[in-house]
Image (cartoon, helix red, strand yellow):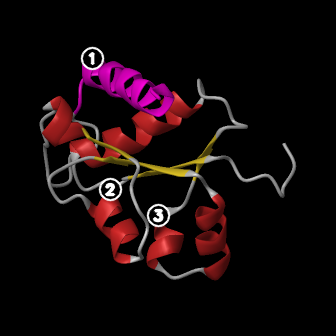
Amino acid sequence: MSEEHTPENAIFCCFGCMSSVGALTGVAMLEAYKKLDKERYGLFCTSAIAAGVPKHRKTTEKAKRIIVIDGCYNKCTKKILEKDGFKIDKYLNLLLDLKIPKIGPFKPFDYSKEDLERAVNEIIKLCEEK
C-alpha cells in the first residue's frame, strides 16, 4: 500500500478513556482492524478533524464511505464529523446498539472479555456488510 493510497472506507472511533465503553471502543476497533483488509479500510483520526487539520480533512474527503464507532450516548465521534459536514454511512454505538454498560468515570478497564469479543465481531460485521 503506497502512501498516496486512501482506503475507500474511513473508520473513525471513540477512544474516550474516561469510561469503560470509551476505552472498549478504541481497543475493540484496533482488534477488529487487524482482521480487516487494509487496502479497503483505514483508521482515520477524529482528533485531527476536530482540530481542523487540512490534510486529514482532504484525506477523509477522498474516502467513499465513513464508518463511525462510538461508545456511549454522548456520540462524540459522530458529532465531530457531522459538525465538520461529513455524512456518516455506517454507525455503531456500543452502549445504545449493543447495550454494553458504561462504567465510570475513570474506569477504562471495567469491561468484560465477552463484551470485547462481541464488540470486535460487531465492528467487523458492520464494516463488511454491503
Residue to which mark 2 is pinned: 16
Q: Is residue 55 left or right of residue 65?
A: right
Near-viewer residue (19 or 97): 97
Q: Does 99 sit above or below residue 44?
A: above
Tag in front: 1 or 3: 3
Q: Is residue 104 left or right of residue 125?
A: left
- Counting labels gives 3
Residue to which mark 1 is pinned: 114
The type of residue carrying mark 2 is: Gly
In the rendering, at what x and y percent does residue 19 appear?
21, 50
Residue range corresponding to the magenta coloring:
111-130
Q: Secondary structure at mark 3?
A: helix
Q: Main secondary structure of the magenta part?
A: helix
- Please identify the quadrant where the N terminus is shown: top right
The tag earlier along the polypeptide, 2 or 1, is: 2
The type of residue carrying mark 1 is: Glu
**Residue 26, image quadrant:** top left
Residue to which mark 3 is pinned: 46
